[in-house]
């Protein structure tokens, strides 16, 4: 029985600590909201945008992200999207905000492969980005969702790969959808907006750098990336 269905028919338990009462309890949610800041990989790859994350990828945040992404706890989408919203709000309040105060912003989710979407039964990052846009619009932000990236070829599972192996695995893997290129103004508008990439976790930064490169190749500025969590890895 899918976990999403169990969340509906049974009393919810926190994905971060298993306490009954909510899919993400206030204490575990606070771990996502209390320290949004730039979190860079130990050796950032070339082209990585300014990278802001809600939390470190450990403890309750790690358990909650895995429950949402890999175990079908889709009821976590709203509280996790709220973490992205608070992270983006914190980034915009920073003196180092890289996007320009007067330019519209688009959120571009990093795409999963079709195979991964089929296996999981949902598109975790795409759903989070859509909900985050809705939350930011409610705050009066001029922002839009632009799911224009696609994976152009099959890539290996990134788990367990070194930074160098990840870079080789993802080189040239992303592109802007042809329909989006043909109707670029419909996606980007005439005001030359800037794009912020959205992903769940940043590890080596290779995925975000490759995705940013694909957008820049299409003529889109990508100064920022927002993730739920960040983990540090040793160079391998």
Image (tube, grey):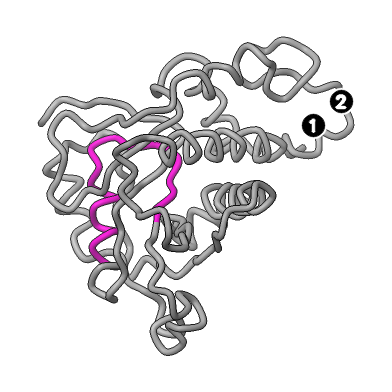
Identify the residue shown where x is 11% and y is 30%. 235
Residue 205 colored in magenta in the image: yes
- In the figure, is residue 55 to the left or right of 207? right
Residue 122 visible in the displayed image: no
Does the magenta segment cover residue 208?
yes
Q: Position of residue 202 (x, y in %)?
A: 33, 37
Label 1 crowd bin: few (<14), some (14–19), many (20+), radius 10 Å: some
Which residue is disc 2 drawn over? Answer: 10
Location of residue 74 by image quarter = top right
Does residue 113 sit above or below 17 in this rendering? below
Q: Is residue 32 above or below residue 143?
A: above
Residue 196 placement: quadrant:
bottom left
Distance between the Cα atoms at labels 1 and 2? 6 Å
Q: Is residue 52 visible?
A: yes
Side of 222 where 74 appears, left or right = right
Label 1 close to label 2 by CB (< 8 Å)? yes
Q: Secondary structure at mark 2?
A: loop
Label 1 sits on a secondary structure element that is: helix
Q: Which quarter shows the C terminus?
A: top left
Q: Which residue is mark 1?
A: 7
Q: How many marks?
A: 2
Residue placed furthest toward the right: 9
Which quadrant is home to the N terminus?
top right
- Residue 97 position, x and y percent, is 34, 43
Crowd class of label 2 (few under 14; some 14 to 19; many from 20; radius 10 Å): few
Residue stretch in magenta: 196-214
The image position of residue 52, as x and y in percent, is: 36, 36
* Depth check, front residue: 236 or 30: 30
Q: Position of residue 207 (x, y in %)?
A: 29, 50
* For residue 175, above or below residue 76: below
Between 89 and 84, the one nearer to me in the picture: 89
């Amino acid at each position: 029985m899918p976990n999403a269905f169990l969340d509906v028919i049974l009393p919810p338990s926190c994905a971060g600590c298993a306490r009954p009462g909510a899919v993400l309890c206030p204490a575990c949610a606070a771990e996502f909201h209390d320290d949004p800041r730039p979190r860079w990989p130990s050796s950032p790859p070339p082209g990585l945008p300014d990278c802001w994350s809600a939390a470190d990828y450990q403890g309750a945040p790690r358990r909650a992200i895995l429950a949402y992404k890999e175990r079908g706890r889709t009821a976590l989408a709203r509280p996790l999207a709220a973490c992205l919203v608070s992270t983006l709000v914190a980034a915009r309040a920073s003196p180092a905000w890289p996007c320009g105060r007067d330019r519209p912003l688009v959120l571009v989710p990093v795409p999963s492969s079709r195979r991964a979407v089929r296996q999981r039964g949902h598109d975790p990052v795409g759903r989070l980005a859509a909900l985050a846009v809705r939350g930011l619009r409610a705050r009066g932000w001029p922002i839009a969702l632009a799911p224009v990236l696609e994976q152009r070829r099959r890539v290996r599972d990134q788990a367990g790969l070194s930074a160098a192996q990840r870079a080789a695995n993802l080189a040239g893997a992303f592109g802007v959808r042809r329909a989006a290129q043909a109707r670029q103004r419909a996606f980007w508008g005439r005001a030359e907006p800037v794009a912020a990439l959205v992903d769940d976790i940043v590890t080596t930064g290779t995925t975000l750098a490759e995705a940013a490169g694909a957008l820049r190749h299409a003529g889109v500025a990508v100064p920022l990336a927002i993730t739920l969590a960040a983990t540090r890895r040793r160079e391998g």
